[in-house]
Image: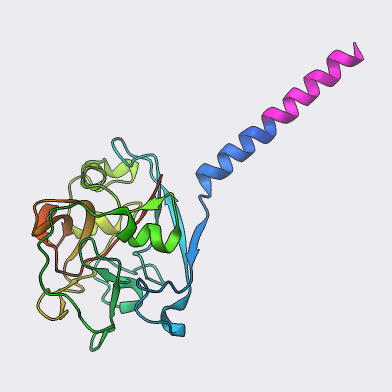
Amino acid sequence: MKKVLIILLSAAALTFVSCSLFLSDVDDPGVAEHGYISGVSPTNTATFRNRVYPTVKANWPGPGGDKVWLALNLGATDKPTSSVDSNSSRSGWYFQFNRSQAYHHNGSQLTPQWRVNSIDQNTDWEPQNDPCRLLLAEPWRLPTVEELRAFREAPIERGGMGEGNRTSAFNSTLQLHAAGSLHSFSGDLRDRGSSGSYWASDQFNSRNGEAFAISETGSGTFGGNKAFGRSVRCIKD
């Protein structure tokens, strides 16, 4: 009888520990962090050296709906306070398609100097150039266009956007906001505080990559000029 009791108590304890671990993983997905990485971080100065990102667990149907995502744009240091927040520390860094180099714009100055104003390359975003993978290591990566579409179409009550606009994006689990973009010609800052666009890992064609845009009037995916600097929101396999 004592042996049976011990076995039952051990099984119960194991079940309790297993459930606790499972719930902890779902309810508190933890943080992701990185230091300076040459060829990715804007410069090797204290301003760009260390980042710690909170993460969130998705809970919507479709691709990417059961995965962990960064709760901030890559390169950001704080969460946005509204859908039209124009603070550079909350906008994070900008990237050109299939390029690892990050750019930061403080509103008046671009870091580092703009290097490329035209990209014609017949490829998706390659793993060796993926800034999520380079900064955070595997299994972090850029999201696919299907994962971004699933987020956009997901019900609001499940943390998605319900096919809404920038307000819906900000009120979602990911709290995306109008972080703007950098123009391909010289890296000029455009539309921060009014609209934003986020890269997917898929290309549209040799000159355009799949991107996800939010604005006051709506949202959607589109083929965007690969040489534009756009925001990145990483996902974890």
Q: Quadrant of residue 47?
A: bottom left
Give the magenta-colored segment's residue range: 1-15
Residue sticking out furthest to the top: 1
Quarter containing the C terminus: top left
Q: Main secondary structure of the magenta part?
A: helix
In the figure, 90 relative to 71: above or below?
below
Q: Is residue 10 left or right of residue 198?
A: right
Q: Is residue 147 left or right of residue 118?
A: right
Q: Does the stretch in magenta take in 129?
A: no
Indicate the position of residue 163 as horizontal and vertical percent values: 17, 46
Query: Can you say whether 186 is above or below 223 in the image?
Result: below
Q: Is residue 2 left or right of residue 30?
A: right
Q: Report which quarter residue 23 is drawn in.
A: top right
Task: Give the x, y percent position of residue 151.
Answer: 26, 45
Quadrant of the drawing holding the N terminus: top right
Visible residue check, residue 193: yes
Residue at image position (33%, 42%) is: 64
Q: Quadrant of residue 87?
A: bottom left
Most distant residue in the right direction? 2
**Is residue 13 one of those drawn in magenta?**
yes
